Each structure stands twice: as C-alpha cells, then as structure tokens.
Amino acid sequence: MEAIECIKTRRSCRKFKEEAVPHEILEEVVGTATYAPSWKNTQITRYIVVEDKEKLQKIASDCVLNFEYNMKTISRCPVLVVVTMVKNRSGFEKDGSYTTSKEDRWEMFDAGIATQTFCLAAHEKGLGSVIMGIFDEAKIAEVVNIPEGQQVAALVAIGYPIFQPEAPKRKEVSELLSFQ
C-alpha cells in the first residue's frame, strides 16, 4: 500500500472480529512505528499489549470514566494497546530543564506521532484501530503494570475490522492552509 493511500483510507474502527491478532504482526507494527520521529531521537513511546479478557473487561467497566463509546469498544476488541511514554526526556535537556516554552508537552506530541504511525502500520497490515483519550490513568495503572517512569498517553483498540468505516467529510484545503 502506498503511503498516501494508507493515510487516506485509514479510519477509526470500533468493531472488530473476535479473531486474535498474531504477536508477529504486532511486533511488525511496532517495528514500523519505531521510525516515527521524536524529540532529539528520544523514542519515548512504549506499547503494552492487553489481550487478557478479564483485564479488557475491567478496563472497559472501571477505567474509561463511563464513556460509553470506549466501554463498548474495549469490551469487544481482541487487543488493547496501552501507549505509554517515558517521562522527563522529550523536551528536556540533560540537566532536567525544559528546552522550549512547550515544556513537557513535547512528550505527548512525540507519543501522538508514534501512535499515529502505529495505527497507519496496523492499517497496512489489514488491522483496524481507534485511538482513545478518555480514561483514568491511575485506574489503568491498577489494572496494567505500567513501568516506573512511564505514564499512559493513549489507549488503542486494535483488531481485524468487521467493516471499513466510510470517510467523514473533510474540510477544504482553503480552510486549513494560509500563505504569508
């Protein structure tokens, strides 16, 4: 699949087949995501794969702030990827000071780039995914062993899609682009 086709055809997918995703495929997807750019090549993004049905149900029922779409999506996905980021590296100097006025927000920026790259690589492998941001980080940490020095950036439900969602209407380029 060509890059532009991959970008234009990838959609958020919330309904998956029950079919398991082979670990080899997930390893390939993460291997591709390692090429995402990051602040001074810090590569702070990490991926924790949750396949255990009890953990998935616990996350769905207790960890997404009763947000119905996330509850439904997580309860019926075969795999949930907890995307974490190593704290205090991206956007920081070696002495611990911030490099720019963006301070520690570079961490989330880098995790976002890597997460989108992960989802595009998954799409190329025939997988559907949806990035979710409504969750209780402390409760996620109770269910999933988050390594010390890391924090949750996003949740990504992933699996083989039941159907390919249609593309929503896009804004015109003239609304998004300006020249000075």
Image (cartoon, rainbow, N blue to C red):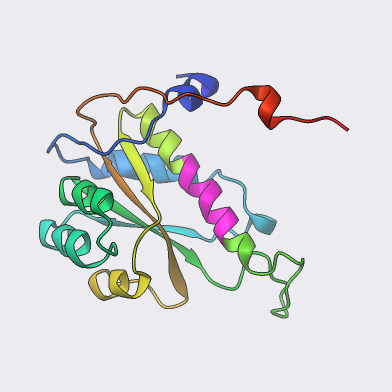
Residue at the farthest right position: 180
Instruction: Kindly indicate the quadrant of the structure image that contains residue 121.
Output: top left
Is residue 111 found inside the magenta-colored segment of the image?
yes
> Range of the magenta residues?
108-117
- Residue 71 vs 32, above or below: the answer is below
34 lies left or right of 53: right
Q: Nearer the viewer, residue 78 or 179?
A: 179
Name the quadrant of the C terminus. Answer: top right
Q: Residue drawn 34% across and 75% down?
A: 138
Q: Nearer the viewer, residue 92 or 140?
A: 140
Instruction: Kindly indicate the quadrant of the structure image that contains residue 101.
Output: bottom right
How many numbered tags mark residues here? 0
- Residue 180 vs 132, above or below: the answer is above
Q: Position of residue 125 (x, y in %)?
A: 34, 29
Q: Residue drawn 16% across and 41% down?
A: 20
Is residue 159 found inside the magenta-colored segment of the image?
no
Q: Nearer the viewer, residue 141 or 175?
A: 175
Name the quadrant of the N terminus. Answer: top left
